[in-house]
Image (spheres, rainbow, N blue to C red):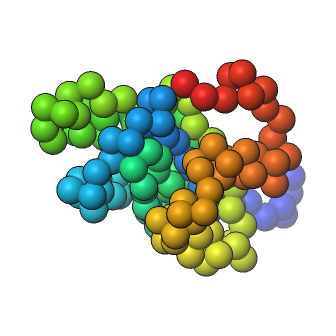
Amino acid sequence: MKGAATMPQSLVRLSVHVIFSTKHRRKAITPEIREELIRYVGGLLVDLACPPIEINCVDDHLHILSGLSKTLALAEVVEKVKARSSKWIKTKGPQLAGFYWQGGYAAFSVSESMVAAVREYIRDQPEHHRRRSFEEELREFLRLHRIEFDERYLWD
């Protein structure tokens, strides 16, 4: 096309909220490793060109709010974060030698106008889970984002 404007570079800003639990929702993320795990996951995300915005966890699951790399698929990012962090957790003591994350995950796009609210929600995880379980939280997120699910296949 003569005279058409072209964009010589790819400019991307995608934010995602990712949630996954420990296998069988085992309460394995102890206070002793929690902060170190959050920092470790943050470092993994930086290495994957997915800048972390907020990360937090409670004893049985993890929330990540981050940018999404323009060169990696979300599934690849989550797979790498889960595999590498699981391997790292297993080095944190004999009681964690059998640690695993659940097989799946949930992920939601976050508009720029909602990043602050999602960030605050993730920061307040311990408070949220004084009132409701991970299972209740995840079901609500799936409903809010209109994701159909079959309860028989939701948990592992």
Of the pair 26 and 113, the residue shown nearer to us: 26
Q: Is residue 10 left or right of residue 31?
A: right
Q: Position of residue 89 (x, y in %)?
A: 24, 39
Of the pair 150 and 81, the residue shown nearer to us: 150
Q: Is residue 141 left or right of residue 72?
A: right
Residue at x 46%, y 50% (from the top left corner): 62
Residue at x 43%, y 61% (from the top left corner): 56
Q: Is residue 145 visible?
A: no
Of the pair 54 and 9, the residue shown nearer to us: 54
Relative to 151, residue 135 above or below: below
Q: Position of residue 7 (x, y in %)?
A: 69, 61
Residue at x 66%, y 52% (from the top left corner): 137
Q: Position of residue 10 (x, y in %)?
A: 61, 57
For the C terminus, the image quarter is: top right
Relative to 155, residue 145 above or below: below
Residue at x 86%, y 52% (from the top left corner): 1
